[in-house]
Amino acid sequence: MRDVIPAPDVPRVPVRGGGTFPVRRIYCVGRNFADHAREMGAAAPVSPETRGTPVFFMKPADAIVTGPDVPYASATHDLHHEVELVVAIGHDAPAGVLSTANATDLIFGYGIGLDLTRRDLQAAAKAKGLPWDIAKGFDASAPIGELVPAGQVDAASLPTRLLSLAVNGTVRQQAPLGDMIWNVADILHELSRLYRLRAGDLVFMGTPAGVAALVPGDVCRAELEGVALLNCRITSAVV
């Protein structure tokens, strides 16, 4: 059957060395760093035995921004940055729950992104006990740098590498990936309980403490030490 409207373009992320990665879904992990959970007023686990289960939410695939200019979001006066490791899935998962031992076999590569958040809308929704999808899943809410193929990354060294964000040259967020409550294998395992992971999926892995507001004109430099980089600038809102 023919399409009755033009088919939308598939969002794509550039890959180091050439090519692009077509995006199917964007999964995000909330409260994956204890210090960030505490700064948001949530309880943080004190040991692996008390960590419970991860918090997940989603963004639309077309929230991706791969260029240097990121428009300030509409309907907010408090747009926050959250720097995150991004994991790209390169193979469809088998049916059933993935084991942590096999979960990382799905990984195509790694990148770094910003989970932009309309914090005022999130706070208002939380105060009323309502879902806060509109605070996370909006246009241009997922700036991302190029993906680095997994074969070019020493995965064993990832826990020691610093995840950081500087705004206008001042570091606001910084922590080693080893501070994540759930590591990459843990998160893919837990996601597989809820969804069938497929090639083209991206997973934003959570942010450390230090989230704060951005304003038009701010210049952001997000880095996963020795692996991935994202440079972008916040522009005026698109009307």
Image (cartoon, grey):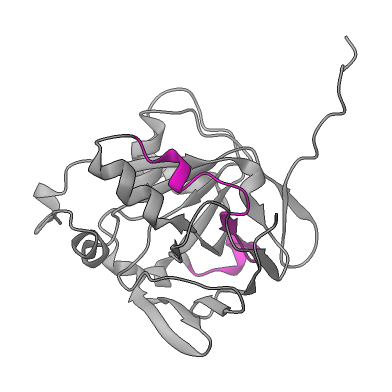
Q: Residue furthest right?
A: 2
Asked whether the viewer can see residue 185, the reply is no
Q: Residue furthest bottom?
A: 169
Residue 132 covered by magenta stretch: yes
Q: Nearer the viewer, residue 210 or 148?
A: 210
Q: In the figure, is residue 110 to the left or right of 70?
A: left
The residue that appears at 54% across and 63% down in the rendered structure is: 113
In x, y percent, where is residue 52? Answer: 17, 42
Q: The C terminus appears in which quarter of the rendering?
A: bottom right
Q: In the figure, is residue 113 to the left or right of 146?
A: left
Q: In the figure, is residue 110 to the left or right of 238?
A: left
The residue that appears at 37% across and 41% down in the rendered structure is: 56
Residue 141 covered by magenta stretch: yes
Asked whether the viewer can see residue 168, the reply is yes
Up-down relation of residue 42 to residue 170 (above or below):
above
Picture mark count = 0
The residue that appears at 31% across and 51% down in the rendered structure is: 123
Up-down relation of residue 235 to residue 26 (above or below):
below
Q: Nearer the viewer, residue 232 or 71?
A: 71
Give the extent of the magenta segment: 131-154
In x, y percent, where is residue 140? Answer: 62, 54
> Quadrant location of residue 152?
bottom right
> Quadrant location of residue 44?
bottom left
In x, y percent, where is residue 141? Answer: 56, 54
Q: The N terminus appears in which quarter of the rendering?
A: top right
In x, y percent, where is residue 70? Answer: 65, 65
> Quadrant location of residue 78?
bottom left
Q: Nearer the viewer, residue 68 or 22?
A: 68
